Amino acid sequence: MKTARLFVNLRRFNALLPSLALLLMAVAFAWAALTTDKPSPPKTVVPPGQSEGSISDVLELRKLDVDLDFGPKLVMLKVISKKKSSSMYDNPEIRNLVFVSDDSETMKWVFPTQDQELVSVHPLKNAANEIKGIYVESVAKSSEAKASGFHLSSIYLVSADGSSLKKVLSDVDEVVNRRNDAHKLRLIYKKQNTVRMAQIDMQDFKVLSDRELAKMN
């Protein structure tokens, strides 16, 4: 009698095995979904002169997406800003550029503040493929700029080692053409109802000329 009951219980247990296996798989998938859907907070970087608690958005370092090779001892990285909404992060913005040197324990921040978005970063090379400077186009991210509804650009030039920064143009609607050699950078751009051309010296970033080419209706 006991042997027959044992066999009956064994058959019942064997019949339940597929259901138990499915239940365990469902629990495993649910646990994996719960653990992977929650993104871990990005590693933050704190700009000079600011405390970590005063930063309204997350700043993190990433490799720049353009071909900027400064040699074995100098690396330039972009500082990404990621504002958090609910449990997710909005699309990142390039907020700053930093230089990291092998012989320095600190990072060299190119822009003094974080109140802008860098919409274009390009190397300026000569015929020998040497980097003479860095072209940066930025848009102000201040509350006044957002309220105005206009997104005018400013054009900066940065030296190849990050030691100097100069704004060469402001209130630009659109840069139409950009080209340079070892001596000059030439920019054709739109500003209000005009098309203009500026020439900038590649040695000291001085604006040599900025003249009107045409008017638009």
Image (cartoon, rainbow, N blue to C red):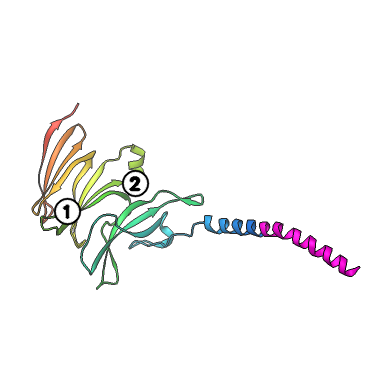
Q: Does 17 sit left or right of 126 as displayed?
A: right
Which quadrant holds residue 63? Answer: bottom left
- Residue at the spot 23% in from the left edge and 46% down from the top edge: 154
- Residue at the spot 23% in from the left edge and 58% down from the top edge: 68
Q: Please, what is the three-letter code of the amino acid marked with disc 2?
A: Ser
Q: Which residue is mark 2?
A: 142
Q: Which residue is mark 1?
A: 124
Mark 2: secondary structure = loop
Q: Say which of marks 1 and 2 sits in front.
A: 1
Q: Which residues are magenta?
A: 1-23
- Give residue 204's position: percent from left, percent from top: 11, 56
Q: CA distance from mark 1 to mark 2?
A: 28 Å
| For residue 125, above or below residue 72 | above
Question: Which of the numbered marks, if any, corresponds to residue 16?
Answer: none
- Give residue 201's position: percent from left, percent from top: 10, 51
- Residue at the spot 13% in from the left edge and 32% down from the top edge: 214
Question: Across the whole image, how many numbered discs are drawn on residues?
Answer: 2
Magenta: predominant secondary structure element?
helix
For the residue pair 166 and 37, the one nearer the viewer reads as 37
Image quarter in which the C terminus is found: top left
